[in-house]
Every structure is written in structure tokens, then in C-alpha cells.
Image (cartoon, grey):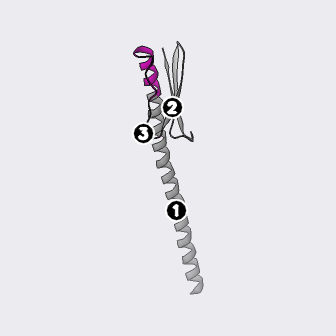
Amino acid sequence: MLLTVVLLSGVVLGATAVAGIIMLQEIRQATNATDSMKAIFAADTGIEWELYKRFVDKRYALPTMTNGAEFETASSTNFIKSIGYADSRRRVARSFRVDL
């Protein structure tokens, strides 16, 4: 009887640990998707900002994003490159390049 209780407790404990690990991975994936989208939109903002500066108003100020995302741009006469970051720690980055 005691052996049965110990074995059943071990099985329940193992199933709970596996379920916890799976849930943790799912939460990480959801967070990574959110950060990825923030970085993509930040990179797109950088491209739009550089294009606006180039073709409309050279004195247009750097936009601020309320979601904490950031971007940096590099441009020449032939291309514009923008790298968007999800947050100030810059763990998640996405980039776009436009050839002119």
C-alpha cells in the first residue's frame, strides 16, 4: 500500500513538473512574439522617418514611441537601413533596408 502511494505521488509530481515547464515555454514564446512585433514596428518607423526627412522636411524631429521601443538608422544616397529594438536592453532587434 505504501509503495503504491509513493509511486502515484511520484507520477503526479512528475506530471506537474512537466506541465510547469511547458507553461513556462509558452509564456516565453508569447513574450517573444510581442517583443518581435515592437521591434518590427520600430524599424518601420525608422524607415518612414528617414524617407520623410529625405523627401519632405529635413528638420523633422526624431519621433518618440510610447511603448518603449527604439530604433537607429543609417542612410546614404543609395539606401536606408533601420534597426528596431523592443526595449532599451536591446535583446530583440529587427531591421529593414530600403534601396533607393
Could you give the CA–CA distance between mark 3 and mark 2, rounded to whole angstroms? 13 Å
Dot 2 amino acid type: Phe
| Residue tagged 1 | 20
Find out whether the residues at labels 1 and 2 contact each other: C-beta distance under 8 Å. no
Label 2: which secondary element:
strand
Mark 1 or mark 2: whose residue is earlier in sequence:
1
Mark 3 or mark 1: whose residue is earlier in sequence:
1
| Residue tagged 2 | 71
Query: Badge 3, how many Cα within 10 Å: few under 14, some, many 20+?
Result: few
Q: Is residue 66 magenta?
A: yes
Q: Which residues are magenta?
A: 46-68
Find out whether the residues at labels 3 and 2 contact each other: C-beta distance under 8 Å. no
Query: Badge 1, how many Cα within 10 Å: few under 14, some, many 20+?
Result: few
Label 3: which secondary element:
loop
Dot 3 amino acid type: Thr
Please state the horizontal and vertical placement of residue 76, each as a whole percent of the image: 54, 15
Could you give the CA–CA distance between mark 1 and mark 2, rounded to whole angstroms? 35 Å
Compared to residue 40, the image places residue 56 above or below, namely above
Compared to residue 68, the image places residue 50 above or below, namely above
Q: Is residue 84 magenta?
A: no
**Image point (56%, 68%), residue name:** 14
